[in-house]
């Protein structure tokens, strides 16, 4: 739970529970009245009332008319403190995961824009009509660790590799014959005909050795 999003009365309840859990307020102690607590925490008596209700609900304190707010259980205060810590950690992890998803979405958008720019530049520079396709190199493909020249990629597939989209989002344009294929590479190639993609798909998993 983020600091700024936590209601004031919950912060006050947590603070009082922490003092009870750490034996600052001992069991049987009569706490100051709501008005005094409201002045101490610089909040309204209503806010203090909500905080005390939470503590009373968790059996940490007991409100006795004519007596006041009595500390009832250090054990329950410690359980309350641990529960809050777990919620805070869970909320923090959730926020971290949410931030990672946002960063991933941003990176995906940047990659998409780069690919669009690349496609446009290729179409602009080429006099021939291009029919571009993309495919990920499958895990454990036999071409991983081999160069474009070693695999005779074009000879078997009739597909011209025009770029390689790396795992980190970088794009290698017009890779030379000495480029070494890596796992998670995404090949961008020009199809000679409507069977080219099938030939590439088959070739990536078929070893000619």
Image (spheres, rainbow, N blue to C red):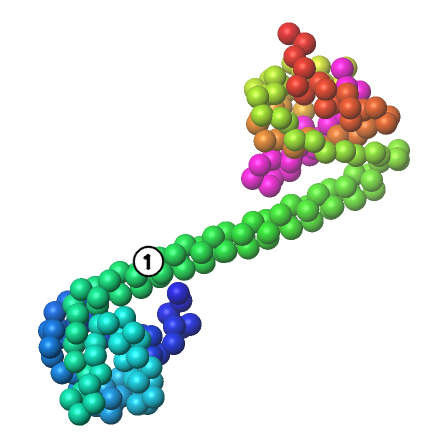
User: Please, is residue 161 above or below residue 66 in the view?
Assistant: above
Which residue is nearer to you in this view: 83 or 5?
83
Query: Which residue sits furthest right?
Result: 128
Relative horizontal placement of residue 192, taking residue 31 as reference (left or right):
right
Which residue is nearer to you in this view: 64 or 81?
64
Q: Position of residue 53 (x, y in %)?
A: 30, 79
The image quadrant that residue 127 belongs to is top right
Which residue is nearer to you in this view: 23 or 201?
23
Q: Quadrant of the N terminus?
A: bottom left
Residue placed at 88% from the left, 35% from the top?
129
Q: Position of residue 86 (x, y in %)?
A: 32, 58
Q: Position of residue 19 (x, y in %)?
A: 18, 72
Residue placed at 33% from the left, 75% from the top?
10
Q: Position of residue 117 (x, y in %)?
A: 73, 46
Relative horizontal placement of residue 131, taking residue 183 as reference (left or right):
right
- The reply to whether residue 7 is visible in this rendering is yes
The residue labelled by disc 1 is 86
171 part of magenta stretch: yes
The image quadrant that residue 4 belongs to is bottom left
- The reply to whether residue 15 is visible in this rendering is no
Relative horizontal placement of residue 105, taking residue 59 as reference (left or right):
right
Residue interval drawn in magenta: 156-175
The image quadrant that residue 138 belongs to is top right
């Amino acid at each position: 739970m983020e600091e700024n999003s936590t209601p004031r009365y919950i912060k006050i309840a947590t603070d009082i529970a922490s003092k009870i859990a750490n034996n600052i307020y001992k069991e049987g102690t009569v706490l100051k009245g709501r008005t005094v607590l409201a002045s101490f925490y610089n909040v309204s008596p209503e806010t203090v009332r909500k905080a005390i209700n939470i503590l009373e609900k968790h059996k940490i304190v007991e409100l006795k008319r004519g007596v006041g707010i009595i500390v009832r259980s250090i054990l329950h205060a410690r359980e309350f403190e641990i529960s809050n810590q777990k919620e805070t950690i869970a909320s923090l992890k959730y926020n971290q995961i949410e931030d990672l998803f946002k960063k991933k979405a941003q990176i995906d958008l940047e990659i998409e824009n780069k690919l669009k720019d690349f496609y446009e530049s290729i179409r602009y520079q080429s006099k021939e009509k291009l029919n571009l396709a993309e495919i990920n190199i499958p895990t454990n493909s036999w071409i991983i660790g081999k160069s474009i020249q070693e695999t005779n990629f074009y000879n078997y597939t009739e597909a011209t590799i025009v770029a390689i989209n790396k795992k980190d989002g970088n794009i290698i344009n017009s890779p030379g014959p000495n480029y070494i294929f890596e796992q998670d590479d995404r090949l961008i190639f020009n199809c000679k005909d409507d069977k080219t993609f099938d030939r590439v798909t088959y070739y990536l998993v078929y070893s000619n050795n």
